[in-house]
Amino acid sequence: MTSICVAFIGLGQMGRPMSGHLAKAGHAIRAYDASAETLATVAAEIGATPCASAAEAAKGADVLITMLPDGNAVRTVLIDSGAAAALPRASVVLDMSSSDPVGTRTLGKELAAQGLPLIDAPVSGGVARAKTAQLSIMAGGDAAAIDALRPVLEIMGNRIFLTGPLGSGHAMKALNNYVSAAGLAAVCEALVIGRAFGLDPEAMNEVLNASTGKNNTTEVKVKQFLLSGAFNSGFSAGLMTKDLATAAGLADAMGIEAPFAHDCVAVWQKMVAALGAGADHTEFFRFSAEADRSSR
C-alpha cells in the first residue's frame, strides 16, 4: 500500500502499539493525546509528528483514527474540538474506540453531511495482541470504504470482520465484552466457591479447560492474571463496566428484555465501587474473594 498520512488520536495502552505498527509500516503519523507527556513519549518512540490538538493532527490526513475511552470522547475530538472540520474532504474517519453504536450512527450522519465517511472498527485482544498486531477488528460501515482501508487495518490486526452497516462494529464489540465479562465473573465466583470447599484453583482451571466451562478467562487469564495476583491485563474495570452498560443499553434500544445483562452491569458496578474504576478488570477475582470473606 502507498504510504498515507494518518492522524492518530489517543495514544494510551492500545493506541501506542497500534500507531507504532502504522509508523513502522511506513505511514506518516500525525499524533495527538490529551496527555502532553504521553504524546511526547510516544511520538519520539515511533517517529510521529506530535500535534498540539486533534484539529492540528487532522490537517492533511488521509485517515483519522480515534482510539479513545468512549463515544463521547470521540464526539468531543471530532465535532467540538474541530478535528472533522480540519480534515480534507477526501479523508475517512476510523473510530477504533469502544463507542455506543446508537451514538455512532448519529455521528455518522453528521460527518456525512460534511463529506466525511465514518467507519467503526473496534478491536478485541487487549494490550498483548495490540503489541503483536494480532487484534481482531470488527468493522462496520460502507463495505467499499472498509475494503479500501483493509491494508491499514491489517497492519494492526490479523482478523478483520465485516459486521454490517455503520454502528454494527461497536454493537458487536459491546456484546462481545458482555459475554467476556459474564464469563470472567462466573469463573471468578466458581474459583472462590471451589477453594472454600477445598478444591485447588489451579486444578479447577485445568478441569474447566478440558470441559464445557472453558472460555477466554480460563484459557488466558486465570493463571497469568488471577491466580498469580498480577492483575495487570491492561484493561480497566471501569472500561469493562462501560462496555457492559453499552450492551445493556443496546438491548433496551432494541426493545429486548435482557435481565442477565442488566444484572451483570450491576455486579460489575459493585466491583468498581469497591476497587475503583482504574482497577484491572481481572481484579474481579479479588473482589469475589473479598465479598466472600465479608459475608462470613
Image (cartoon, rainbow, N blue to C red):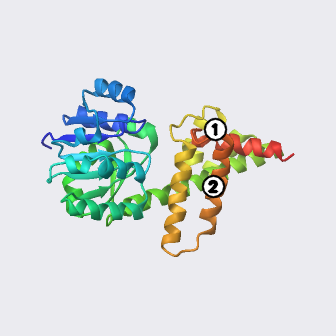
* Closer-to-camera residue (9/167): 9
- x and y percent of residue 196 in the render? 81, 44
- x and y percent of residue 241 in the render? 56, 51
At label 1, the amino acid type is Leu
Q: Nearer the viewer's eye, disc 2 or disc 1? A: 1
Residue on which disc 2 sits = 213
- Quadrant for residue 294, please give it: top right
At label 2, the amino acid type is Gly
- x and y percent of residue 4 in the render? 16, 41
Is 46 positioned to the left or the right of 5 in the image? Answer: right
Q: Is residue 136 above or below residue 140?
A: above
* Closer-to-camera residue (221/67): 67
Task: Say which element carries label 1.
Answer: helix
How far is the residue under mark 2 from the one under mark 1?
17 Å
Task: Say which element carries label 2.
Answer: loop
Is 253 positioned to the left or the right of 36 in the image? Answer: right
Mark linked to residue 140: none
Q: Is residue 205 visible?
A: no
Mark linked to residue 226: 1
* Closer-to-camera residue (124/264): 264
**Which residue shows up at 34% across the image and 53% down it?**
121
Dot 2 or dot 1, earlier in sequence: 2
The quadrant of the picture occupied by the C terminus is: top right
Q: Is residue 200 visible?
A: yes
